[in-house]
Image (spheres, grey):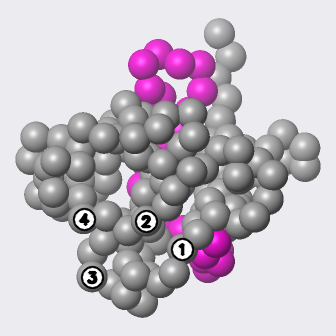
Amino acid sequence: MRKYTAGSMVYVEEAMGHVALVEPRRAPGYLTFPGGYSRRWPRESAEESGLREVKEELGLELSSDLEPVAVYQQDGRPHYDHLFASRLDKTKPKIRPRARFWTVVEVSHVDWYDLTNPELWPTLVPEARTALRVFDSHFKLGLHGV
């Protein structure tokens, strides 16, 4: 089976430690990190995909130097997921999805969340829970039991 890069998830943290999460329309009531699949034409890198998805889903223009965190496969799938992080100097900057067709179809809500609240963890889609464990290990967030 051929292995390929499928996309990116981006951990966007504001100055007070809150993290931007997206409620996807495909999973009402659940949350995930901003991100998505890499475009095949024109071909984009995983980092370019992460920057584009953050811009589309959160309306934030991030610098082009996302911090690479991990590359891994989930559940034996044939593609790789790339995790990136960006830490902002601002406190809870305004976020909202860009008014574009696909963003409106994909995203129903975005907001800043406190990941230290364990009641939030069950609302994460499985891919986001896996990513959160990786982010927790990388940044030493202290989220025991995720």
Q: Are marks 3 and 4 in contact (CB under 8 Å)?
A: no
Q: Which amino acid is tagged 1?
A: Ile
| Residue found 85% across the figure and 47% down from its top | 43
Q: Which amino acid is tagged 4?
A: Asp
Q: Are marks 1 and 2 in contact (CB under 8 Å)?
A: yes
Element carrying mark 3: loop
The boundaries of the magenta stretch are 59-83
| Residue found 37% across the figure and 87% down from its top | 91
Q: Horizontal and vertical percent for residue 32?
A: 44, 46
CA distance separating discs 1 and 2:
7 Å
Give me the disc on residue 111: 2
Residue occupied by mark 1: 95
Quarter of the rendering occupied by the C terminus: top left
CA distance separating discs 3 and 4:
9 Å
Q: From the viewer's perspective, is 118 left or right of 51?
A: left
CA distance separating discs 2 and 3:
14 Å
Between disc 2 and disc 3, the foreground one is: 2
Q: Are marks 4 and 1 in contact (CB under 8 Å)?
A: no
Q: Horizontal and vertical percent for residue 42?
A: 90, 49
Q: Is residue 25 above or below residue 10?
A: above
CA distance separating discs 3 and 1:
15 Å
CA distance separating discs 4 and 1:
16 Å
Q: Which amino acid is tagged 2?
A: Asp
Q: Which amino acid is tagged 3?
A: Met
Classify 10 Å Cα crowding around label 2: few (below 14), some (14-19), many (20 and above). some
Residue occupied by mark 4: 114
Classify 10 Å Cα crowding around label 1: few (below 14), some (14-19), many (20 and above). some
